Image: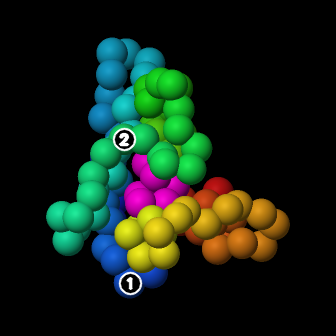
């Protein structure tokens, strides 16, 4: 499953790809072609395989948005109560 969204004026896509029977791999790509990947620069994970499709999509969404922040500001924005990252995390996938 894949989905597209826009953050800070940049459109990105995320997808969750099944890995075996009970795992998902999340990845992102910025539609302007400037970045893609599966690792969040702010919260790198040793393993990008997740237990559910929603977890993989959530991690890929965070990774995409942090990549956009790095491209625009030179660094990812921190997450705190009420920060744009927190709001995005809860609103982007309806959690």
Placement of 49 over or under 92, stated as above or below: above
Residue count near mark 2 (Cα–Cα under 10 Å), binned few <14, some 14–19, many ≥20: many
Q: Quadrant of residue 94?
A: bottom right
Residue 58, percent from left and from top: 52, 49
Q: Position of residue 20 (x, y in %)?
A: 33, 15
- The quadrant in which the C terminus is found is bottom right
For the question of whether residue 65 can be seen, the reply is no
| Residue stretch rendered in magenta on the structure | 60-67
- Seen as rendered, the residue at the extreme bottom is 9
Residue 60 can be seen in this image: yes
Q: Considering only vertical position in the picture, is 11 above or below 25?
A: below
Residue that extends furthest to the left in the rendered view of this protein: 33
Magenta-drawn stretch contains 62: yes
| Percent position of residue 35, x then y | 27, 58
The answer to which of 7 and 67 lies nearer the viewer is 67
Dot 1 alpha-carbon crowd within 10 angstroms: few under 14, some 14 to 19, many 20 or more: few
Q: With 82 as the anchor, is 46 left or right in this view?
A: left
State the SS at label 1.
loop
Q: Which residue is mark 2?
A: 38
Residue 59 vs residue 18, the one in the foreground: 59
Q: Which residue is mark 1?
A: 9
**Magenta-colored stretch includes residue 32:** no
Q: Observer-nearest residue: 73 or 40?
A: 73
Which label number is shown at residue 58?
Answer: none
In the figure, residue 16 lies in which quadrant? top left
- The residue shown at (49%, 60%) is 66
Q: Residue at x 70, y 61 (%)?
A: 79
Q: Is 82 above or below relative to 45?
A: below
On screen, 38 above or below 23? below
Mark 2: which secondary structure? loop
């Amino acid at each position: 499953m894949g989905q597209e969204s826009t953050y800070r004026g940049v459109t990105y896509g995320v997808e969750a790809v099944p890995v075996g029977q009970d795992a998902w791999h999340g990845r992102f790509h910025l539609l302007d072609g400037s970045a893609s990947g599966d690792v969040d620069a702010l919260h790198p994970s040793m393993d990008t395989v997740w237990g559910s499709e929603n977890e993989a999509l959530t991690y890929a969404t965070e990774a995409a948005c942090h990549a956009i922040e790095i491209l625009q500001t030179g660094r990812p924005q921190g997450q705190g109560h009420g920060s744009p990252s927190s709001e995005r995390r809860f609103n982007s996938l309806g959690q």
